[in-house]
Amino acid sequence: MLRQIFYCSVAEPPDGEPDVAGILEHSRRNNPALGLTGMLTYADGVFAQILEGDTTSLDIVLEVIRADPRHSDVRILSDRMATRRLFSDWSMLHVDLDAAEDRPLTDMTVAVSRSPTPDGIDRLIRALAYRAVNEVIDTA
Ligand SMILES: Cc1cc2nc3c(=O)[nH]c(=O)nc-3n(C[C@H](O)[C@H](O)[C@H](O)COP(=O)(O)O)c2cc1C
């Protein structure tokens, strides 16, 4: 059975540069063997990640991720079974929100991570998945 998890966390240290490159390197090295796919983004001090895979593999990687000192306050905002993967081609797609046009999505990510509501979480997952398509086109 396929499971999809969405979580947000607070990047540590709060005023430092996030180690996105290092995290992507780890993810892309480890996730294929676990059959995990997903996306990662960083927005104004907040990490947001979608992870897809089987239940056991997700439990394993989540335990490792939770213990990572590069972030804190890992909060699972959505944990559900899915019928298909959104990110089947990516062991970890990086959605880079640095561009000015991504400001609304950055603000939405921070707002939902601070005050999650079921509707806000659902809209954010959809917006990130939609934005991820542009990332794929831009980097193709
Ligand atoms: C926000 C965030 C997301 C991460 N996502 C993953 C991931 O998807 N897969 C993974 O293996 N490690 C991920 N990591 C890194 C792990 O916490 C850990 O550093 C890594 O798995 C250790 O890999 P190693 O045993 O090969 O050194 C993430 C870390 C952070 C802070």
Image (cartoon, rainbow, N blue to C red):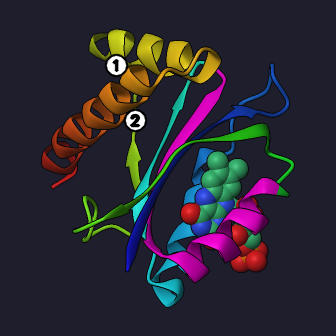
In this picture, is 43 found above or below 23? above
Task: Inspect the image, locate mark 1, and give the three-letter code of the amino acid beneath it.
Answer: Ala
Q: Where is residue 109 in the image (x, y as percent from the top left)?
A: 48, 22
Q: Position of residue 23 (x, y in %)?
A: 63, 56
Q: Is residue 115 left or right of residue 52?
A: right
Q: Where is residue 76 in the image (x, y as percent from the top left)?
A: 62, 44
> Which residue is more in the foreground, 66 or 98?
66
Q: What element does badge 1 sit on? A: loop
Region of the chain picked out in magenta, as a range: 45-66
Magenta stretch contains residue 49: yes
Callout 2 environment at 10 Å: few (<14), some (14 to 19), or many (20+)? some
Count of numbered badges drawn on the protein? 2
Give the residue displayed 81% in from the left and 34% down from the top.
12
In terms of image quadrants, where is residue 80?
Answer: bottom left
For disc 2, the marked residue is 96
Magenta stretch contains residue 62: yes
For the residues labelled 1 and 2, say whether their Cβ atoms are less than 8 Å apart. Answer: yes
Give the residue displayed 46% in from the left and 10% down from the top.
107
Give the residue displayed 26% in from the left and 42% down from the top.
129
Task: Inspect the image, locate mark 2, and give the three-letter code of the amino acid beneath it.
Answer: Asp
For disc 1, the marked residue is 99
In this picture, is 109 found above or below 126? above
Q: In this view, does 103 lie to the left or right of 77?
A: left
